[in-house]
Each structure stands twice: as C-alpha cells, then as structure tokens.
Amino acid sequence: MINQQYKKMLETKSVIRQLSEFAAGRGKEIGYENVFDYSLGNPSVPVPERLTEVMIELLQTKDSMELHGYSPSLGIPSVKEKIARSLNRRFGMNYEGIHIFPTTGAAGAVAHALRCVTMPGDEVLTIAPYFPEYDQYVNMTGAKLKVVPANTENFQIDFEKLEEMLTSKVAALLINTPNNPSGAVYSKETLKKLSGLLDRKQKEYGHDIFLISDEPYREILFEGVEAPYVSKFYDNTLSCYSYSKSLSLPGERIGYVAANPKCRDGELISAICGQISRGIGHNCPPSIMQLAVAEVLDQTSDMQVYERNMNILYEELTTLGFRCVKPGGTFYIFPKALEEDAVAFCKKALKYDLVLVPSDSFGMPGYFRMAYCIDTEKVERSLPALRRFVKENY
Amino acid sequence: MINQQYKKMLETKSVIRQLSEFAAGRGKEIGYENVFDYSLGNPSVPVPERLTEVMIELLQTKDSMELHGYSPSLGIPSVKEKIARSLNRRFGMNYEGIHIFPTTGAAGAVAHALRCVTMPGDEVLTIAPYFPEYDQYVNMTGAKLKVVPANTENFQIDFEKLEEMLTSKVAALLINTPNNPSGAVYSKETLKKLSGLLDRKQKEYGHDIFLISDEPYREILFEGVEAPYVSKFYDNTLSCYSYSKSLSLPGERIGYVAANPKCRDGELISAICGQISRGIGHNCPPSIMQLAVAEVLDQTSDMQVYERNMNILYEELTTLGFRCVKPGGTFYIFPKALEEDAVAFCKKALKYDLVLVPSDSFGMPGYFRMAYCIDTEKVERSLPALRRFVKENY
C-alpha cells in the first residue's frame, strides 16, 4: 500500500514554494522583471570562473573511469583531506580526512547528522526563527523537534528559555548561524555561553548532547561581522556545510558533515554516516563535484551584491518604520510585520507585486522574510512599491 | 547519544568491500595487473564521448544560475519529459514527465520506492540470489526483507516457493532483472506468470502488492537475449533505473523511479518520493547530470567487452566442470562452487590471486560471483590461474 504518512505530507505544501509559484504565475502576466520576488533563497551570482575551468579540465583530461567511477562510500579520500586542511587553516581546527563525510548539500548533512546522534523518541531542540525543513529532517528520524522561542531583541539565544527546554530527553541542539531567516550571526559570547550550558547539562544528565551546526551561509558575512567557528567552542559538534551558497551551485548538491575530532566517537561519525547513507540510498555526492570543489575550497562567488541589497533594504525598511535587526550575513532580512497577522500582511503585499514570506513557518508569528538574492536594480525598483504598500495600508 | 543501531552496523563489513580491499593490498605487493580481481561491479569502459561533449557544452554556454541553480524538488521538468518519451518509444509505455522521479542512482530509486509503498512492519520479498544492499534499503524503512529461495535450474523464479511466502503481510516484491549476481534475465513467460500471481493475490488480500523492479543492467544484454520491460506486465510496478552501468558513471549518482501510469496513485508517486526526499535530505540528483544524461538517453557506452569476457569465462568454467547458468546480461557470472562452503572455496582461490565473491551475502550458499567488468586481456591471463586453482584443489 502507498505509505499514508508520506501521502498526507502532500497536503501541507511549503508556503515558500506556493509563494514562489505565485510569483512565477504573476511573472507570466506582467513580466517576471516586474514581480518583486523576495521568496526564494536561490543564489543570484554565477559560480567562480575557476570552478567552471576546473570542471572542464577534469572532463577533458581525467580518465573517464577515474572521474566518473564509484567514489569510495565515505567520499574521495583526497577531497576529504583537502577539506580538512582548509578548515584547519581557516579556523584552527585539527580535522583529518576521516572526520569529513561528503554529502549532497547541507540538507543531506543535517539529515545524516541528526540520525547519527538521535534515537527515535529523543528530543531535538532548535531556536526560532528556524529553517522550516528542519521539521522534515527531524520527523523522518523518529525524533521530535521542539522550538525554543526567539530572542527578538537581536536573534541571539534566549538562554533562560533554552535552559528550561533543555531536559534530559534532549539528544541534540540544531542551530543555524548565520541564520536563515533572520540573517543574525551568533557572537563569540553567545557561543561561549551556549557551550557552557551544554557542558553543564551533559554532566548533569550523564549523557552526550550534540550540537548540530548548520552553516551554509558561513561565507556570506557583511562588513565588520565575524562568524566564530561553532565547533571551536564545543567538542560534541557536528558542522554541516554546503557549497550551495558560497559557490552558487545549489543544484549540484555538494556539502559535508565535519565531526569535531574531540567529539564522542569522532573518528567513527563519518563511518556511521556511511551506514545511514547505504540505507537511505543517498550514497556519495557526485564524483565530479567532489573533485571540482576540492580545487576551489577557499574561493567564493562574488557576493558583494548581497551586502549592497541588504543595506538598501535595511535603510528603506527602518525609514518606513519597520522594526528590524540588521543582518550580519546571509541574503535574508527578517523585519516585524506591521500587523500581528504576518500572513494577512504578506497577502496585502502581493497586491503590490511584492512577494514576502510570512514568518509562521519559521516557528514564530508576526514577522516576514525577504530573500534579497536578486539584482540590485530590481531591489531599487521595488522600493516605490514597498512605500506605496505601507502608506496605503498602515 | 550516538545511535547504536548504525554504530553496530559498522561491525558487519561488506564481504565484497573486504575482498576488494584485499585485492588493492595484494596489488601493492605484486602489481595490481597481476591480481585477478573479479570482486567489484565498477564499469570498465569510458562514458560515451557525446556525454563528455554535452557536459563541456553546458559548462561553456549555459547560464551559471540556470545550470547550477536549484532544480525543482521533483526534478527538472524537461528532463523528466525526455526520459518519459524515451521509455515510451522504446517500450511502448505511456509515461508522462510526472511519472518520473530523478534519483541519485538506483540505490536512491529503490530506497525511495520501498518507502513509498511500505509501512513499518510490512514484509518485502526478494528472490535469491539478490543484491546484498537490499537488506539495508529495506531495514531502514522499518519493513522486513524475506528471501524467496532461488530457482537454481535457470535463476528464473521458483513460483511454488514464491506463492508460499506471498502472504497478506507482503506489501512489495523487489526483483532485479538482468540480475546481479546471476546475470539471468527474466523471460516473458516468467513475467507473465509473475503478473498473474500478483494480480490474483492482490484480489485475494484486498490490498495492493507493488512490484519494485530494479533495472540498472537493463541495457547490458547479450546476443539473442531480450529483456522484456517489467512494467508492461503489471500495473503496480515502480521501475528503478540507474545510468551508472549503461553510461559508465556510477560516481555521478543519477537514475530515476518511473511509476507505471496505471499503478495506484500513479500520478502521485513522484510527489510522494519528493516528500521522502525532503526528509532524508536526498533532494535532487545534481542538475548538470540531469541535463547531461537527458541528451544521451538512447546511447550507451561501448559495452561489447562484457559479452566477450562472459563468453571466455563461461567456456572456461564449464570446461573445468563448473555448473553454471549462462548469463543473459550484466557483467556477472554465478557458478556453483566446487565445494559446499563457498567462503572456503573463495579463500583457496585467493592463493592464486583470484578474487571471487562467495554467494552467502547474495542470500544463498555454495556459489560464487565473478564481476568481469575488466579488460579482456586480464580475463585471458587469469585462465591459467583458474585452471591451476581447480586442478590443485578439486
């Protein structure tokens, strides 16, 4: 029989997806350039030229069986070692190749990491606002996702509420910094305090609490902002990364889990991920992508446009009276809506061809997300619509 | 805490993997060209030249964001439609794009199909000899794999035993034709009889029984052998395909599930797979590979070497007194060992630098598998070793 659990999931469509479909439909009527589509986090800048060159070189020169043949089930050793060395150089870590498990993007990384360190029935905490797909990743393992309310002051962590919810049932805490949707970057102070709390609770409960750190936006940081490397602060950390955003290739599905060498069973995490991978048929990410990104590990796409767009929008939004925490990175901004019901607010905005995403699916009401990975010229053209929308409705 | 289920899995190493590691180690001692390594099913011929050309063209000419951007979560529509049309043309089916769900190879396809049509606790049947990874795919869904004993006469199906085991608990039957490890291809008669039995049992039990057809070797057929298209015979069929073998790119992870348009919820299967995919973080196969294979759907690598090798080995093995069903396709042959204990048999062979895989992990004792996706020159050089091995031990 068709599995009813999955069939039922079809009824709950992703809000972001629906909005993006609306934008596409409206685009057919009035020209997509006239729809101010802030719905999707799809990078708007090309991959680094060097990446394209490397891929063409691989195709032209490398033996076909070597290039396209089975990658070892835990990933290509030379690629894993290069990733480890790059992380060590940049963040002062001590990874070796065995601590790196290549995955199909951060989705694969987070889903594997979760399975690795939870048993069905365990609780996993995350902190609002959070990326809605976490619901799917956690549900599928049989664990339960619980959401710690947001610190709306600055989108750091509300430690009082976190400690309250950090019971002995909690196997893992899933964080995302720089954060989708808020753009907030956890400070050194936040991470120190977090590490202290988790350490204390591990001792109190007598079992490990893993920190799963989802970091696909690690490389998109704005002027003056530092993103401390989470794993530096807490041994039981699994860092989940994707090249989707930094190299602008979300469709090629390439990322990794990096297990802190000092975490419990640190030298086994990658192999355990391999077993999980066998069972779900995930297997390795594409060989050519493993080999290609290994040659451009310390490069990124030219991502200046995101900061330019953020500055334009932040200024306009605050001028219009929005309460808004200034993003430290990502290509998102997360202002408070001008009425309590963010869904109603975003619906009204659609009449001005402004596609905004209400915050409800990010685990808190009353806010909205704008993904400004679009051309600056379009951001500028959207400002009069934004002004009209606010003026005529609030 | 580290999930103990997955950690325990580390203790049971794949026999094939161990043998292949032995072969690599021995290769370092005596030169890999002197190890007659018949352990791994890794294609030994290059990808079609056109595929490399297409990939380079895509990289040189296609807009980076279009080429490397997010693929829609159910796959790139134009690719799905091309696959559907190719299957319709070749096999007289009526697929549309919505019936095709692109996956990361056949592993991803089978794992998704299984989740789609089973509930935890259900039984899934497969037929010996079978691909050992089926254990992992089925276990991870919470269903139970049961193995129907082989028809050792010709490796078609022992219908008496199948019917005995086809109780009302069975949600799906997982078959593999052309078969790894036997090389047998199910005949039209076998598939007709199978379809009749499944139809009868569906009516008797009042619920669907799905046929999951794993077909990565569909394109590797030997002279005079036809591989009837399984889905033609039975409506509730999910066909699982991989381009790994036909296009020699197992490392690039690209394949699909094709739901028979007449199967239960046929138009929803792809979308249900999409929900499963979200949860396990699998997401789509790499965009560039989706776009590239769509341009060479009706091509294959030059696979004549496999038939040449099969003929040489079949003749030698039967001359040496092995009982052996002549393969109709694949790059495997599956003779009866010359003693009851196939593990002991294969261990003795190692002394002659012959790496053979004992049949126990394929769900039956007493046989061994040879994967002859290697150069013909090496097959020929292995014959004296094979003769010596037999003469000195049996």
Image: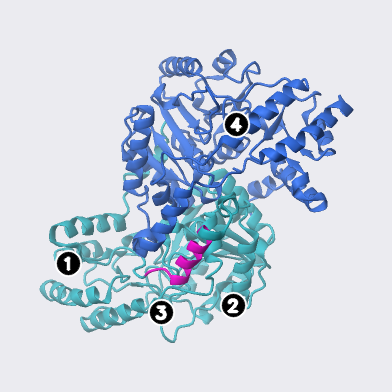
Chain colours: A cyan, B blue
Q: Say what amino acid the circle numbered 3 marks.
A: Gly
- Mark positioned earlier in the residue sequence (2 or 3): 2
Identify the magenta region: A46-59
Q: Which mark is residue A91?
A: 2
Q: Chain of mark 3?
A: A
CA separation in Å, label 1 and label 2: 43 Å
Residue neighbourhood size for the residue with mark 2, other residues' Cα within 10 Å, grouped as few (<14), some (14–19), many (≥20): some
CA separation in Å, label 4 and label 1: 59 Å
Compared with A275, A367 (above or below) is below
CA separation in Å, label 4 and label 3: 61 Å
Check contact, mark 4 vs mark 1: CB within 8 A. Answer: no
- Mark positioned earlier in the residue sequence (3 or 1): 1
Compared with B353, B182 (above or below) is above
Which element carries disc 2, helix, strand or loop? helix
Q: Are marks 2 and 3 on the same chain?
A: yes
Q: Which mark is residue A34?
A: 1
Q: Which mark is residue A328?
A: 3
Residue neighbourhood size for the residue with mark 3, other residues' Cα within 10 Å, grouped as few (<14), some (14–19), many (≥20): many
The residue drawn where x is 74% and y is 48% is B21
